[in-house]
Amino acid sequence: MRHILLLLITLATCLSTSHSQVDADDLLAGAAKIDITHPDKKIVEIPLLSRALVLQQQDTTLVIVTMDVVSIGEIGSIPDDFQENVRGRIEKSLGIPGKQIMFNASHCHGNPSPKSEDLTVQVIEQAHAKLEPVTLRSGRGYEDRVQENRRMKLKDGGEIDVRHAYSLPPNKEILATGPIDPEIGILRVDKKSGGTLAVLFNFACHPIQGTPVSSGDTSDMTGYAAAVIEDNLAPGTIALFVQGCGGDINPIAYKDVDHPRNAETLGNMLGLSTLKGIRKAKPNEDQRLIVINESLSLPRSNLAPRIAELEQYRESLVNSFGGTTLNLRQFIHLTNKHNLSPDAPSYHISRYLHDKALGHRNLTIMDANNKAAMNSYLQNIYRMEELTRVNANLRLLKMHQQQNVDAGKRTIDVEVMALRLGNFVMITFPGELTVPIGLGIKERSPHPNTFVAGYTNGYIYYCPTVEQLKNVGGAQEDSDCILDPQWQEIFEKKVSELLKRL
């Protein structure tokens, strides 16, 4: 009995000491991760995860959930009611308001578990159960070797982009490529008791490198980057990747056909560059936690006129095909000969010199005729490639025009969050923002450490700039969009207002 009494006294003393160490103004945090890979996947290159970071200060709580999925609803395997359901369940179990829970999709194209909702609720609850006093550090890293802008400016004024659904135009038609954002936004959450609890890193890139095995599943380059960070910090550290303005950014050399697809190399580089920034992250002067969630109404587009124009253009392309004397086999045969020896494609140069001395021109005339036939065939190939691009974009435009008609109203309501975590500031948006949007927000922000998260709290397809939307029908970003060009001004005005309130 005496031993039990001593044990209870000791336990009470420990609890009293623990509570006395937590000041009322302390920032508390907890983090956890859970595997959400589809159980039927036989080959998994690197698993898909849901990660949760819960931050609490007095009456304010923020939950950041990052998921290795293509989107939160709309496309992919995460159902449209996922976000509402998880928020409702967490509000019931933990009392955290739904609008203070942020969901960001990495936009990897893996296949998550059908139980992702239950697992995500579970990981939030696990993170909340681990709350402890923390301090924040913020900083940035730099990585410019793993990504490229997928948009190319053409000499005729149009734009094209790099995706597997398109063949690329001839080199001679390309004028320039678009910008990238090599900055890595970093928030480091350190335990007051020592060690790092979690790291949040924000970067702009489509993580769609894929696996060497076509049937394999993967959280892609950003999954590898997170693993590199977790493996090189204190045991138990959770690294949360928050996707940025990656709408027009591909992995580097995305159309490579000479090497197997390998996301690990790119992810390792991103992870190591992030670690450099993590180690240089500076202590924040203040530890404020501010969460703002507002609804914004954006105008839907009317794509009917552009669809009609593109259909006319498609008809003109079809009518421009001309007859050629060559077939594919002959074209390849002649191309090989003329590329190997442009001055003497049909025989050794000695025969050409012999004929020239005698005044014979049979070979040179035949070569000229063959070259003309090759050019005619090649023009048909280029027209065919352009036709495939037009068809792909027309399908997107018609799909979104029907969506906008079926919506029954000319606007769409979206969530925009503004977060302040110490000196780290973040704006969120549900669409696939392109890099110029993010670069502009960062440049105009009054806060030095401002970052932007797309693919957050829902999904509304691509959101290109006004300038990019002048190219509707020429690239995926401008064709796979439901918004009117006015959306950008409305969004950026709201962002400016929110940043001033942080």
Image (cartoon, rainbow, N blue to C red):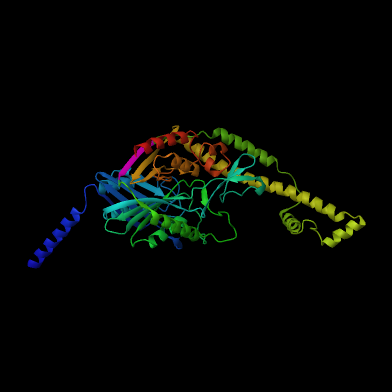
Please name whichever residue, 267 or 483, is drawn nearer the observer in this view of the structure.
Answer: 267
Residue 293 lies within the magenta run: yes
Residue at image x 26%, y 46%? 57
Q: Is residue 338 above or below residue 445?
A: below
Q: Is residue 165 above or below residue 491?
A: below
Q: Residue at x 86, y 61 (%)?
A: 351
Bounds of the magenta segment: 288-295
Task: Please tell me in which quadrant of the rendered image residue 441 appears.
Answer: top left
Q: Is residue 113 left or right of residue 22?
A: right
**The N terminus is located in which quarter?**
bottom left
Q: Residue at x 87, y 54 (%)?
A: 362
253, above or below 81, in the image: below
Label tally: 0
State whether residue 259 appears in this view: yes
Which of the 4 quarters of the picture holds residue 234? bottom left
Q: Quadrant of the C terminus?
A: top left
- In the rendered image, residue 156 lying in the magenta stretch gets the answer no
Q: Residue 378 location, x and y as percent? A: 71, 49
Q: Is residue 81 visible?
A: no
Q: Residue furthest right?
A: 358
Q: Which x, y percent locates residue 263?
A: 49, 58
- Main SS of the magenta part reads strand
Which of 408/65 is in front?
65
211 sits left or right of 328 in the view: left
Which quadrant of the figure has residue 99? top left
The x and y percentages for residue 178 are 55, 45
Question: Left of 313 or right of it: where is 350?
Answer: right
Looking at the image, the residue that sits furthest to the left is 2
